[in-house]
């Protein structure tokens, strides 16, 4: 009797467990970057920096190079045209990157008429320390769904702010030397809950 009751319970529980699994992500077929807005995939365009700003040069000079000068990439507009509606980031990258291992998401500093991303520090005696500050990086989970097809989500709830997604690791040291305004690009998004 106990065995029959156990089998009946398993008959109802086992199939219902199949419905509890999250479905596999389904990305659009055309090449591009897509942001999930509600139930739809919205295609988004790449954004490039409009220049670089150096700060702290005077402090560095007066301290004989002990204080760092800092370089920031600048992006136009105070907010991205691509705004999340909730705190979960979902994106599909179709044919825009060769590797999911180089994908990184960084939080930008918001200014009145632009957004900035700290990129490097320079000291006279130690040279350029060129890297994205780990404090600005947001953890993402990247799943490879096919050849050059990646689905990514934020590992935790997104904080409020403006962000940029890089599909390659930028060569910040080369940009600092060249001061090339079009050499840094990624996909900008924002999240500003009311």
Image (cartoon, grey):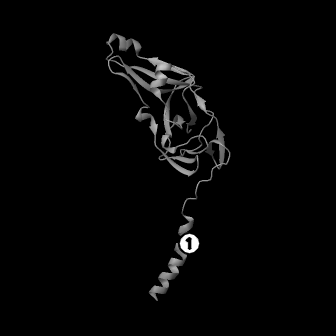
Depth order, front residue of 134/176: 176
Q: Is residue 30 above or below residue 123?
A: below
Q: Residue at x 60, y 30 (%)?
A: 47
Question: From the image, which quarter does the C terminus lie in?
Answer: top right
Residue at left offset 36%, top offset 11%: 61
Does residue 126 lie above or below 64 as drawn?
A: below
- Give coordinates of residue 64: x percent, y percent: 31, 12
Secondary structure under the numbered disc 1 in the rendered image = helix
Picture quadrant where residue 65 is located: top left
Residue at 57% across, 36% down: 189
Report whether 138 appears left or right of 91: left
Judge from the rendering whether residue 44 lies leftward or rightward of residue 163; answer left or right: right
Q: Position of residue 163 (x, y in %)?
A: 53, 35
Q: Which residue is mark 1?
A: 15
Indicate the position of residue 117 as horizontal and vertical percent values.
49, 28
Outermost bottom residue: 1
Within 10 Å of disc 1 (Cα), the crowding (few <14, some 14-19, many 20+) is: few
Above or below, 100 relative to 48: below
In the orientation shown, which residue stands out farthest toward the right? 30
The number of callouts visible is 1
Position in image of residue 177 (x %, y %): 46, 20
Q: Nearer the viewer, residue 155 or 85?
A: 155
Residue positioned 46% across, 27% down in the render: 172
């Amino acid at each position: 009797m106990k065995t029959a009751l156990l089998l009946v319970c398993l008959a109802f529980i086992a199939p219902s467990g199949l419905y509890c699994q999250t479905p596999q992500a389904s990305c659009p077929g055309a090449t591009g970057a897509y942001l999930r807005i509600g139930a739809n995939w919205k295609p988004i365009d790449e954004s490039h920096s409009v220049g670089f700003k150096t700060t702290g040069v005077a402090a560095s000079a007066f301290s004989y190079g002990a204080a760092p000068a800092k370089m920031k990439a600048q992006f136009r507009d105070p907010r991205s045209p691509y705004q999340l509606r909730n705190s979960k980031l979902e994106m599909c990258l179709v044919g825009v990157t060769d590797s999911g291992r180089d994908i990184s998401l960084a939080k930008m500093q918001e200014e009145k008429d632009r957004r900035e991303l700290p990129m490097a520090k320079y000291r006279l005696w130690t040279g350029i320390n060129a890297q994205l500050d780990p404090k600005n990086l947001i953890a993402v989970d990247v799943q490879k769904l096919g050849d050059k097809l990646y689905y990514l989500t934020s590992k935790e709830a997104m904080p409020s702010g403006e962000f940029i997604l890089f599909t390659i690791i930028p060569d910040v040291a080369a940009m600092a030397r060249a001061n090339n305004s079009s050499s840094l690009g990624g996909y900008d998004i924002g999240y500003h809950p009311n």
